[in-house]
Amino acid sequence: MQHSTNSTFISRNLCSAAINYAALDGNVEVAKGILEYNVMVEDYCASNVASTLIKYNGMYDQIYKYNSSLSVSCVTSMLVRPLDIDK
């Protein structure tokens, strides 16, 4: 009985090598695309950080002042008004 599987073995290995090469080339392209996207996002964020920080600090200051005024008014009302502990 003769087996003629050498050509099948070789062709399968060549096909597998071609698929691996194509996958590797595709992975390189995907990595390049991800890198380009990350650079684009970093540039966009860097261009907006100054204005965003100014707005954030302004809102933080307003909230801080409001909270400070609330705490002062709460303490003042507690000191002025006696607590009724009989109820």
Image: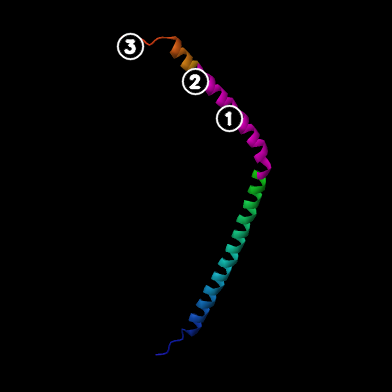
Specify the label residue 71 is tagged with.
2
Mark 2 crowd level (few <14, some 14–19, many ≥20, 10 Å Cα) = few
Where does label 1 land, which residue?
60
Mark 3 crowd level (few <14, some 14–19, many ≥20, 10 Å Cα) = few
The magenta region covers 46-72
Where does label 3 land, which residue?
85
What secondary structure is the magenta-colored segment mainly? helix
Identify the mark nearer the N-term, 3 or 1: 1
Mark 1 crowd level (few <14, some 14–19, many ≥20, 10 Å Cα) = few
- Horizontally, is 78 left or right of 44 in the view? left
Residue sitting at x 56%, y 66%:
23
Identify the mark nearer the N-term, 2 or 1: 1
Q: Secondary structure at mark 3?
A: loop
Q: Is residue 65 magenta?
A: yes
Q: Is residue 51 magenta?
A: yes
Amino acid carrying label 3: it is: Ile
Residue sitting at x 50%, y 16%:
73
Amino acid carrying label 2: it is: Ser
Specify the label residue 39 is tagged with.
none
Quadrant (top left/top right/bottom left/bottom right) for the N terminus: bottom left
The span from disc 2 to disc 1 (Cα, nearest Å) is: 16 Å
Cβ atoms under marks 3 and 1 closer than 8 Å: no
Q: Position of residue 44 (x, y in %)?
A: 66, 45
> Taking 72 as reference, is 13 above or below it?
below
Quadrant (top left/top right/bottom left/bottom right) for the C terminus: top left
Identify the mark nearer the N-term, 2 or 3: 2
Q: Secondary structure at mark 2?
A: helix
Q: Position of residue 17 (x, y in %)?
A: 54, 74
